Image: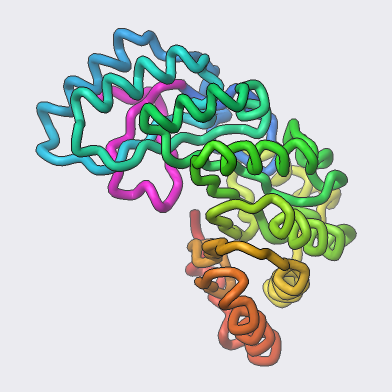
Amino acid sequence: MRYEGMIYRPPSEARSYLLQVTVGCSHNRCRFCSMFKEKKFHVRPMEDILDDIDMARKYYRYVNKIFLCDGDALCLSTSKLLTILDRIAEVFPECERVGVYGSPKDVLRKRDDELQTLKEHGLDIIYIGAESGSDIVLKQIDKGATREEIITAVKRIEAADIMASVTFISGLGGRPLWREHAIETGTMISEMGATYVGLLTLLLEPGAPMREDVIEGRFELLSAEEIVAETLLMMKNINVDRKCVFRSNHASNYVSLRGDLPDDKDRMIAQLERAMEDTGLLKDERFRAL
C-alpha cells in the first residue's frame, strides 16, 4: 500500500487495514500535538484511494476492519466518503467496521441525514479528540472547538447510530487548571453520551509547541501523584445513565483503568485511591511512551 509520511491510528485499530485518504490534519494547530507537523494537509486523489483499495484486496485474504487515515478524513465531502465506503463494501464484503478520525467541526458541518447515510454505507465509528471539557483549556491548546461544540458533535454521531470514541488527556491544564480540567471533563463525559471514552496522559514530544512552553517555564507539568488526583476528581464527576466503555490503559498512563460506566465507577475510584496511598503502584517514567 502507498502512504505519505508517518501514519497514526487509534490503538483499537491495531489490526485494521489502514487506508490513507487525507494526508495530515486540516487543523494541525493543537499545541500538545506533534503528529502531523511535517505534513502539508491535502486530500489524496480519489483515483489513488480507489486503486489502493483494489491493491489491498490482492494482499489481504480477509479484512474485517478498515481505518481511514490521516488526522481527520471526515473533512471530506459526504459524496467522496460515500464513494470510498461503497468501493470498500464492493471489494471487501467481509469488512465489519470502517472507522475515521473526525474533528468536532467536521461533524458539525454535516447534516443529520448525511451522518445517517454514512452509517448506512458502512461508517461505524468516529474517533474524536476532545482533550478537555474546559473551555479555558481548549482555548489554551488551540483546539479549534468549544466544549458545547464537542458535546453537540458527539451527540449527533450517536444519534446517527455511529459509535463515538472520545479521547481526553490528563494533565493538559497544568498546575493552575488541574481542578477545572478534571471537573469539566467529568461533567462533559456525563453529558455527551459517547459509546467509548479514552483517557491518555500528557506526553510532549519534540515538535509539540507546548514542549517549548514547558522548557521555558510557561507551563507546569503535573507530577504522577497529581495526575492520579486529577483523574480521581474527574472520575467522581462522571455520572452517566447509559453504558460507556472507559479505558485509561494507554502506555502514557500512570494507572491502568478498564471498565464500563456506570457499573465499574466505584471500582476504578478505589483503584485510584489505592494508587494515591501507595505510589509504588504507579508506572515508572521509563515505561511511559507513545
Q: Nearer the viewer, residue 20 or 238?
A: 238
How many badges with numbers are in the image?
A: 0
Q: Is residue 268 visible?
A: yes
Residue 18 is one of the magenta-drawn residues: yes
Taking the spot 17% from the left edge, 22% from the top edge, the residue there is 55
Q: Which residues are magenta?
A: 1-22
Q: Nearer the viewer, residue 149 or 270?
A: 149
Residue 266 picture quarter: bottom right
Q: Is residue 144 left or right of 94 when viewed as pictured?
A: right
Q: Establish if 110 lies above or below 177.
A: above
Q: Establish if 66 lies above or below 24.
A: below
Q: Establish if 140 lies above or below 219.
A: above
Taking the spot 54% from the left edge, 55% from the top edge, the residue there is 196
**Looking at the picture, how far across and down is residue 32, in whole percent?**
68, 43
**Looking at the picture, how far across and down is residue 208, in whole percent?**
65, 40
Taking the spot 56% from the left edge, 61% from the top edge, the residue there is 244
Q: Is residue 95 left or right of 225 when viewed as pictured?
A: left
Residue 86 is one of the magenta-drawn residues: no
Q: Quadrant of the N terminus?
A: top left
**Looking at the picture, how far across and down is residue 96, in whole percent?**
28, 42
Taking the spot 45% from the left edge, 12% from the top edge, the residue there is 79
**Looking at the picture, how far across and down is residue 49, in whole percent?**
32, 17
Q: Is residue 6 visible?
A: no
Assign the magenta stretch its main secondary structure.
loop
